[in-house]
Image (cartoon, rainbow, N blue to C red):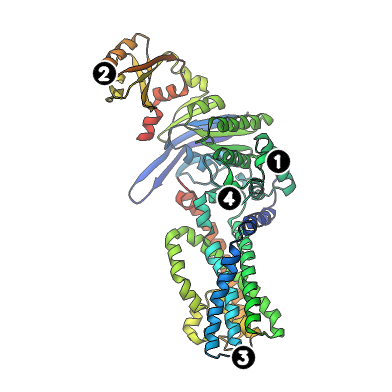
Amino acid sequence: MDIAVETRALRRVYRSRSQEVVALDGIDLKVMRGQRYGVLGPNGAGKTTMIKILVTLLLPSSGEAYVDGLDVVHQFRELRHRIAMVSGGETVGFGMLKVKEQLWMFSQFYGMPSGAARRRIDELLERLGLTEAADRLVSALSSGMRQKMNLIRGLMTDPRILFLDEPTVALDVGAARDVRDEVRRWMAEDPTRTVILTTHYMMEADELCDRVAIVNRGRIVAEGTPAELKQQVQQNAIVDLQLSPGNRLLDALRAVEGVVAASVMEQDGTDRFSLQLSSDAALGGVMRIVEMSGRQIRGVQKREPTLEDAFVKLVGRGMAEEEQE
Amino acid sequence: MSHPSALRIFLKTVVARAYPRFVSSYRNKTWIITETLLPLIGTIAIIYVYKALHAPSRYLGFVVLGGVLLAFWQNVIWAMATNFFWDRAAGNLEVFAMAPTSMAAILVGMALGGAYVSGTRAAFILIVTSILFGVTYTAAGILPAVGVFLLTLAALYCLGMMLASLFLFYSREAWHLADAMQEPIYFLSGFYFPVRSLGAFLAGAGSLIPLTLGLDAMRQFVLPGTPAFIPAAWEVLALVGQTLLYGVLSQVALRYLEQRARHDARLMLRSS
């Protein structure tokens, strides 16, 4: 199995008059051909910057990056024939065009023969359940349909490496599943194809990716298969605690002996704490703190570890907290 | 790994990028009012000024030809030059940039798509005003005038391609400048009067815009007896020079833009 994407000490700094932001801080990455590779991290972690460098839209400040064996800095013209990128929430194109017209237009930018492009578009429209929408104006599409159309744009030129930047963001459950299913199917057709996917949905990375790199603040904090990453928290007991809203409790819970990591997320008027405990015995200390806080317990549940738990353990905080920073 | 030639991709891109503009003019027909009837009223208003002054009929021809070329100038400045600006806002520019095509092909396609509407507008003004006001043209001059017209368009669209990069670099500032320069350019190009009246210095400055020389040469060919700025043959030579100059400068600007955009994310990417 050879290498599809490789970066060495990749660094990107955004400079403005008043400040300097380090978006990528020495990324070393190796993605093998045929892999579905996930880059997982909170918003602002540097995922999109990394993808933009790999698809030749941005230059790195320093370091090296190779895609399909080509240097993204110097061999970008050749590389652009071999790659495609689809981003979540894209509004690319022209609302006055019909879906099939818009896809044909983009195929021409790659020099595809019109007949072959139309056949390929029809095939992909059918696979993604969009045949009936083929003659609909792009401006009349729902966000789910639009994102499926964007995915077809990425797939129709048959790239060797497909970059998906948050491809299911803001999609409903059904549309997101369809997108993931099509990515799987496309990969299964040719074992040399590679997908690099950025996401901040843990479940998506877990379900779709062969390997995952967890990125935070411009650095890779862990890399491995989803199972390997979850293994890091396997020895801990994972407990979800649902409490009524109240005073800040997270720091107090983190200070309890036996609590390895903790994060919180507010959902539907309930604070959902996720705790990693070195043993079940630590739960007693947690409950004492909760009792003292006067908060009402709405639910307690022990569960299997997820990538989110691995992230919390590695970074020390949940994704939502990182995004608020 | 084999892939289509650069020329093939260029030509396909031109056709593909022209397509949305072409198709949208069929699907949204409001342009028939905004791009033909309204400009016609503007041209007729100037014609009435000359008529009120009892000017010779060739002066009416001046206005008609000015109205014809104005259509293309507006396409260049408000559609072609601002094209990248709008495409960036829609998120198109980064998708275009990532494809193995050239930005020049995108702009040429955009211009061709827009030229359909501009051509219709120009033909409408030419035919309707010429019939309404009995403007006549010298038959022998029509062919050379058409040649000058096409040469002027080539120079004009090369200028537009160069301006597209500038608009992207300077964004809003370029926009405001173009807006502010609109009337001075109409004035300096002599859309509605012989540019010779401005004197050598001002007319020379105005000649940096291909419209000025193109209009003057066309008028010399089909409306003989009207005051000429410089001999038509010189104007043709100057237009050839402008086409080459703006063509080369536009390519340099596009290359620079592409390179600069990879350093500065804000230039091409919608959000970063």
Residue A122 disc label: 1
User: In this rendering, would B258 be left or right of B221?
Assistant: left
Q: Chain of mark 1?
A: A
- Which residue is more in the foreground, B32 or B137? B32
Disc nearest the viewer among 2 and 1: 2
Determine the CA span between mark 4 and mark 3.
Answer: 50 Å
Quadrant of the rendered structure where residue B155 is?
Answer: bottom right
- Of pointers 4 and 1, the one earlier in the residue sequence: 4
Q: Estimate the spatial distance between the alpha carbons at disc 4 and disc 1, rounded to whole Å.
A: 20 Å
* Quarter the N terminus of chain B occupies: top right
Which labelled disc corresponds to residue B225? 3
Asked whether the beta carbons under mark 4 and mark 1 sit within 8 Å of each other, the answer is no
Indicate whether A112 appears above or below B18: above
Q: Which residue is mark 4?
A: A95
Which residue occupies 33% across, 13% down?
A258
Q: Quadrant of residue B60?
A: bottom right
Residue at the image point whose x is 63% and y is 32% from the top: A182
Contact (CB < 8 A) between labels 4 and 3? no
Does the CB distance between marks 2 and 4 fall below 8 Å?
no
Q: Residue furthest left?
A: A292
Three-letter amino acid code of the residue under disc 1: Asp
Which residue is label 2 attached to?
A294
Label 2: state its secondary structure: loop
Q: What is the three-letter code of the residue carrying label 3?
A: Gly
Q: Chain of mark 2?
A: A
Specify few, some or many for label 3: CA neighbours under 10 Å numbering under 14, 14-19, or 20 or more.
few
